[in-house]
Amino acid sequence: MKHSKLRDKQSILELIIQKLEEDISISSQAVAIARDTATHQDCVGSSKYETMGLEASYLAQGQGVRLLALERSRAYFKQLTIQLSSDCIALNSY
């Protein structure tokens, strides 16, 4: 029974890491698109009222921050070791 619970916790941990890796892949693509848009020649405004490049740079920055947070989360979950310390699964049950 206890071995089964350990396996269940390990499966949940693997699912979390898998989901984070999928999110990182999507976020990396979003960062690249936003960066390319922000630096594209057609997005440079000819007046102070044309702000598409500026808005795209804010988006790229936000996407970059999100990507960094996802990468840190993945690193955290990858370093966890599963221990069977209790019968229930909680945020601190590792």
Image (spheres, helix red, strand yellow):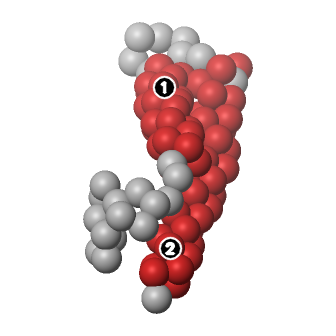
Please tell me which residue is depicted at 39% across the width and 18% down the height of the picture.
49
42 relative to 5, above or below: above
Question: Which x, y percent locates residue 48?
Answer: 41, 11
Q: Which mark is residue 38?
A: none
Q: Amino acid at mark 2?
A: Leu
Residue 35 appears in the rendering: yes
Please tell me which residue is depicted at 59% across the width and 65% down the height of the picture.
14
Comparing 34 with 74, the one in front is: 74
* Residue at mark 2: 6
* Residue at mark 1: 61
Specify the farthest residue to the bottom. 1
Question: Which x, y percent locates residue 46?
Answer: 54, 12
Q: CA distance from mark 1 to mark 2?
A: 40 Å
5 relative to 17, above or below: below
Q: Amino acid at mark 1?
A: Gln
Question: Which x, y percent locates residue 4?
Answer: 52, 84
Question: Which x, y percent locates residue 31?
Answer: 60, 36
Q: Are marks 1 and 2 in contact (CB under 8 Å)?
A: no
User: What is the quadrant of residue 11 in the picture?
Assistant: bottom right
